[in-house]
Every structure is written in C-alpha cells, then in structure tokens.
Amino acid sequence: MSFVSALKKCAVAGATAALAVTGLAATTGTAHAAGPGGAANVRGVDPGNTDLMIERLCNQEGSLTGVYGALNVDTGEFKTRDEYLRDVFGLWKPAGPWELFRGWCGYAQASTWSIKGEPVRTSPWIGNRGSKDDKETFVSSYGTKTFAKKSVGAEIGLTLAKSIFSGTAGGSFTYEWGWEKESRFERRSEKTIPPCTQVAVTWTPYQRVVRVNPIFYVEDYQWNKGDGDVTAHTWRGRDASWKSIYSYGYYIDGTSDKLLPNGQPDGREDKVEEKLDPKTCTS
C-alpha cells in the first residue's frame, strides 16, 4: 500500500486530526530534509504553534473527502471548516489573509526503542512469622499492558491508538508487541520465606516504544491575494517536497509489552522480601 493510500485509508477510517496555527504567504519552499514518511517539517518554518496546529487538524472527525482547515497567515489563527463558515465567511472560499486547505492525515514512524517497564507485584504477600525458614507455593499472574500518550493536545483514546499502532490507520509496524494481541500467564512456584519476613513475586515487563508523527497530506490549498482564487496541491503553494507536512514537536508514543515468539509476555520475574515487625513474630 502506498503512503498516500494509507493516508486516505486513515481518513476514511475516521483516524484524522485538526489544526491550529500560522503561516507565511504562499512562497517557494526552501530546501529541507524529509521527515517521517517523506513529510516536510513546518515547525520553525511557518510561524505559530505548528505542533498544536497539526494536532487540531488531525483530531477532527474525517469525511470521505478528507479533513479541512483555514489558516490566517497574518495572525496564525486556525479554524476548522465549521468555525470558518460560522465566524469568517459563509462560503468555503479564501478571504483576505485566510487560506484554506483540504487533505488527509496518517501516521509515520519516527523512531522506536526498547525499555524496561515498572515492576508490578503479581502475587499476594505471604508472611512467615516463625523462627525458621518456611516454603510456600506462590501463584503469580500478569497480563500485557498497552498505552499511548501525545506530546500536545487532548489525551488519545485507546481505540484510536490501537488503530494507529496496529497499522489500520496508516501506520506500518512489524514488532511483536501487544497492540494487536493480549497475553496473560499464571505461574506457580515454590519459594523459601525467611523468618519474620513476607515475600511476594514481581514481574518487570520488557516493553517497546514506537513514536509516530501525525502527517497531513495536502489535497488542495487555496488563497486569494486580490486577483482571484488560486488553488495549489502543496502546502502554501510550495514545491513538490511540501506535498505532505508534519510538525516535529507533535508526536504520539505507543508503548506495549513485548511478546516472546511463543506469544508469552517478555520480562523478568523476581522474588521480593520485606521484614515484618519483630514484635509480631515468634522469637
């Protein structure tokens, strides 16, 4: 599937977003290094909070024709299509410093890395209040965890996050992790409990983090400088390298427990001990 097709699939699926911010008059774009998915970075190029701009743009509910935005290139103010029709002009036409655009949102991987998650207690505490070692059978259970967070804007819902990181919303990821699968285990093990001590079992999950940058693919971009409406098919009418854009500071991190080839959670089990109050133990 091509990147454009993935973006359009994303929009039709409703995984789109909204926009909030600034720009310069349409000019020829300067040379730049292509970012994730080959997109151009508007952060530091167009004025204003471009991170929030892309967040708002791609947080809109999509339609079969894409997502829409209006940008005041003098003030940097952004409006959705409904806001523009209500507050600025009753027709979807550029007016004065307001420039209009339509397109699709998708998600391109920026980077990925592995981490150790926080240890989780997976069994009850079992105490030994006697004066000699004791042995007990511990039952520990654990299920894989999945979550996501955005660098700006509102919290991201788990349904949208799963659609992004499972690849159905324009992403492409091949890691064995828990976005598309849930895995649980229950284990029994005999452990020694020292005198006047309580013992429990913990699990430290090994996790994968994938960072994606939401990308806006430009279908139409319109402006009117007093000599009639002009329509381009790149951001702000720049060269072909500005066909799709992103803002470097706006990203979504998806974190999920890694899975072993057999489908079981990957991690480390540990025995933890805590001393009990000697007054409650047999001397």
Image (cartoon, rainbow, N blue to C red):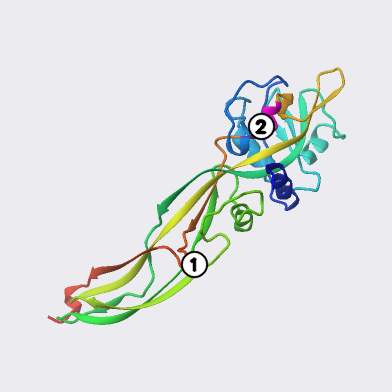
Residue 111: within the magenta? no
Span colored in magenta:
240-246
Task: Return the x and y of residue 134 as percentages of the image width and height.
Answer: 21, 81
Secondary structure beneath disc 2?
A: loop
> Is residue 61 at least partly visible in the picture?
no
Q: Which residue carries the number 1 mark?
A: 263
Compared with 160, 202 (above or below) is below
The amino acid on which the numbered mark 2 sits, given as a three-letter code, is Val
Picture quarter containing residue 5? Answer: top right
Residue 7 shown left or right of residue 266 in the figure? right
Compared with 181, 281 (above or below) is below
Disc 2 residue crowd, few under 14, some 14–19, many 20+, Cα 10 Å:
many
Residue drawn at x 42%, y 63% is: 266
Residue drawn at x 77%, y 43% is: 66
The mark found on residue 24 in the picture is none
Q: Name the mark nearer the viewer: 2 or 1.
A: 1
Q: Which residue carries the number 2 mark?
A: 21
Residue drawn at x 68%, y 22% is: 24
> Is residue 216 at least partly visible in the picture?
yes
Task: Return the x and y of residue 226 as percentages of the image width and height.
Answer: 84, 18
